[in-house]
């Protein structure tokens, strides 16, 4: 069980990590891959900040569940941890991302392209985010997989 201080520190670390990472990675995908304008992408990224604030800590717990399951096996620990990060990221973030894009006026083709691109890029992005999250948790003095 988390102490109140650890709970808030964990929530702050998870929130900081998700807001920063999604802003940078999302803007790059939206502009460079999906063909969205800078204004559309900036609107999407600004809208994503409060959304990411709301979902960051639940996503951190969701991801920790995937990591705990992956750690049950002694075989291929590095591969299974990375696969857990990938699956957690794609399965949690894709529906949220699609809703954000729809709400800022992206058309159906842009949404499909952005979400599909995000899913493909998440093969690396989700794994990189997992490492970034762990780094942020260390900065905030929080242990993972609680």
Image (cartoon, helix red, strand yellow):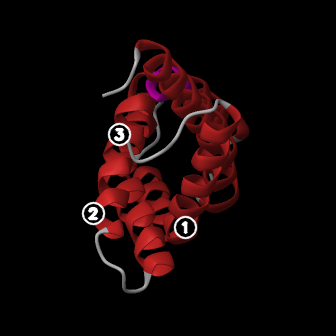
Q: Earlier in the sequence, mark 2 or mark 1?
A: 2
Q: Is residue 15 above or below residue 90?
A: above
Q: Nearer the viewer, residue 36 or 70?
A: 70
> Which quarter of the rendered picture does the C terminus lie within?
top left
Q: Which residue is mark 3?
A: 61
Q: Which mark is residue 35?
A: none
Q: Earlier in the sequence, mark 1 or mark 3?
A: 3
Instruction: Name which quarter of the figure residue 19 lies in.
Output: top right
Q: Residue furthest bottom?
A: 75
Q: Which residue is mark 1?
A: 121
Q: Nearer the viewer, residue 78 or 54?
A: 78
The x and y percentages for residue 6 are: 48, 22
Task: Residue at 55%, 23% (x, y): give it.
Answer: 12
Q: Earlier in the sequence, mark 2 or mark 3?
A: 3
Disc 2 secondary structure class: helix
What secondary structure do most residues of the magenta stretch adopt? helix
Q: Are marks 2 and 1 in contact (CB under 8 Å)?
A: no
Q: CA distance from mark 2 to mark 1?
A: 23 Å
Q: Are marks 1 and 3 in contact (CB under 8 Å)?
A: no
What range is drawn magenta here?
49-53
Q: Is residue 78 magenta?
A: no
Q: Which residue is mark 2?
A: 69
Disc 3 secondary structure class: helix
Task: Residue at 72%, 39% (x, y): give it.
Answer: 38
Within 10 Å of disc 3 (Cα), the crowding (few <14, some 14-19, many 20+) is some
């Amino acid at each position: 069980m988390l102490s109140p201080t650890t709970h808030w520190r964990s929530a702050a670390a998870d929130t900081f990590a998700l807001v920063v990472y999604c802003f940078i990675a999302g803007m790059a995908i939206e502009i460079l891959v999906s063909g969205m304008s800078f204004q559309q992408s900036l609107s999407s990224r600004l809208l994503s900040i409060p959304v990411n604030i709301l979902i960051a800590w639940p996503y951190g717990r969701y991801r920790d569940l995937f990591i705990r399951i992956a750690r049950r096996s002694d075989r291929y620990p590095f591969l299974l941890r990375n696969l857990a990060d990938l699956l957690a990221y794609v399965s949690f973030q894709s529906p949220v991302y699609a809703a954000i894009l729809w709400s800022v006026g992206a058309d159906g083709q842009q949404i499909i392209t952005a979400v599909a691109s995000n899913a493909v890029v998440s093969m690396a992005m989700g794994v990189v985010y997992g490492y970034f999250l762990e780094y942020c948790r260390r900065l905030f003095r929080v242990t993972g997989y609680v």
